[in-house]
Amino acid sequence: MASITVEALTKAFTSQVKSPGLRGSVRALLHPETRTVLAVKGISFAVDEGERVAFIGPNGAGKSTTIKILTGILHPTSGNASVLGLVPWKQRQQLAYQIGAVFGQKSQLWYHLPPVDSFDLLAHIYALEPAAYHERRAMLVELFEIGPHLQTPVRKLSLGERMRCEIAASLLHRPRILFLDEPTIGLDVVVKQRIRDLILELNQQEGVTVFLTSHDAGDVEVLCKRAMVINHGEVIYDGGVTELKHTYLRTKIISLKLAVPWQGFDAPGVTVLKHTGYGVKLEVDTTVAPIEQVTSGLLSRYSIVDINIDNPQMEAIIAQIYNAAQVV
Amino acid sequence: MKSLGLIWRYLRHNLMSAMAYRGAFVLQVFGMLLNDLMLLVFWTLLFQRFPLLNGWDLTGVVTIYAVSASGFGLVVAVFGNLTRVAHVIASGDLDYYLALPANPLWHLLSSRTNLSGWGDLLFGVLLYVIVVPGGWQTLPLYVLLVILVALIFCAVGVLAGSLAFWLGQAQDLAAQWFNATLSFSLYPVDFFPGVVRVLLYTLLPAALVGSVPARALLQFRWQNLGLMVVFTLGAMALAQWVFFRGLRRYESGNMIVTRG
């Protein structure tokens, strides 16, 4: 069953255009000129219940705008969307009972108070039964290992501790969809890992649909099976994370261990990344030079002890997509 | 009803939050009390020279202070974000309130307390107890009037703040509108010429948060109370309507820290 469907969703922002300097400001005051920017250009997609979807794209691509429309924060300019059968911007409050949202850069915890006070307040806002709330809180406290931090004012928590509390807070009301906007921003590697594990666990235990935006390739790779790439307000890729690699993978990395010293290898589409005596690392642009052609060329020229052919890291792939997008 | 529960929750929550810093709490509350007392000294000196000004004596002016300060103090103590509506809209902070299942307007307003407001409220109540004639019999009327005054201030704050939906950057304008209403409310409306007076009963409803309720308290007339009730209901309805219209134009934002 689809938990999110989006059809031809468009959001336009109008902004004032002003030429530089004071003179420009005065002119803009007298003859205001406006420019319409389409942040989201007629995108369509559907997300099934229990899916884990990554929504990726460079800054300003329209990711946050889309999430904000789906959570009812923004009204779209045109198009339709249905989240759990509700129209977000018309049935915002009804929807809010069933979804959770974590905006990595905006806290929903009270800075000067311990998290438990914020939890109590949220329980009131979500109209949770006291018994059910306490049971749920105990379960989340155990899962997120935040017991020791519950009574400490938020300002005294580390970012990682705070983030675990943030996510726990957004799960108090058992949401069916969890929107995560940059949930691991600014966190160290270990904490990132922990947060990813927790999100996965919730998805598997409770079937929560996860809709995530992140610039962190690790988040995408570990957490999500499906990725949507959005750029300039349009979905330019929608499919599996593994397939994403293949689609955008124009390069492969060949690592060689040779029986003889490296003497170079000239072929179009092949770049030497580094070499140290008997070892060498090559990058192959597979659109120019097919991989079998390069390997057979290498085999015929060198006596090879060991060979490894790798895909570039997810990180590099995302960087490639973003770079390609900026050229357009 | 649910919103009332939420407002009450927040009131407790905010006080807890404020009391986490005891020194700042005491200083802000009593600092405002002192500030208000200074203003009063000015009036006392003035009325020593001219006992009656345009039909108002010192008791009248002090009564104006009592209702205006009580109403203003009450509204910013309970709705501490009232003077920050434009800022919350312009900075994209409204996202938080819109992501939760509660009325975003009441939620936004009540999610902060203004500590100096507690000082104003305390000052207003003290003046009422000490100065206003009529004793305890006027208490229910005083309470009612203070609530109406608070709601009128609330409507002005919301209307002014909502300008940010249309103008983007409206913090200064909103602040001026709100503060002008407060400042003018502390002077008897009869001090002003006719044209200004019209303004003080409409766009800057200073008369309705100062002179009119003070008069109702000193010399009760149903007309005064009726005028207050009708105006309050109308202004609140308008403010809510404008705010929710504005929400459709809300543009959110990604402010982290930027230079204004």
Image (tube, coloured by chain):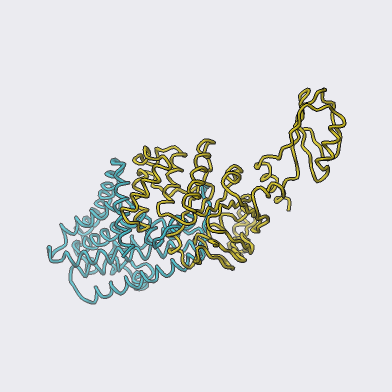
Chain colours: A yellow, B cyan
User: Residue A139 vs residue A305: left or right?
Assistant: left
User: Which corner quadrant of the image does residue A317 belong to?
Assistant: top right
In the image: residue A300, left or right of residue B186? right
Residues A34 and A12: in front is: A12
Q: Position of residue A176 (x, y in %)?
A: 47, 57
Residue A27 in view of the camera: no
Query: Which quadrant of the figure contains the N terminus of chain B?
Result: bottom left
Residue B93 percent coordinates (x, y): 46, 54
Q: Is residue B28 above or below residue B94?
A: above
In which quadrant of the rendered view does residue B61 lie? bottom left
Task: Give the residue at the far bottom of this rendering.
Answer: B223
Res. B107 image quadrant: bottom left
Residue positioned 25% across, 48% down in the render: B34
Apparent side of residue A99 relative to residue A285 in the rendered image (left or right): left
How far from the left and from the top, in percent, is residue A138?
Answer: 36, 45
Residue A319 in sight? yes
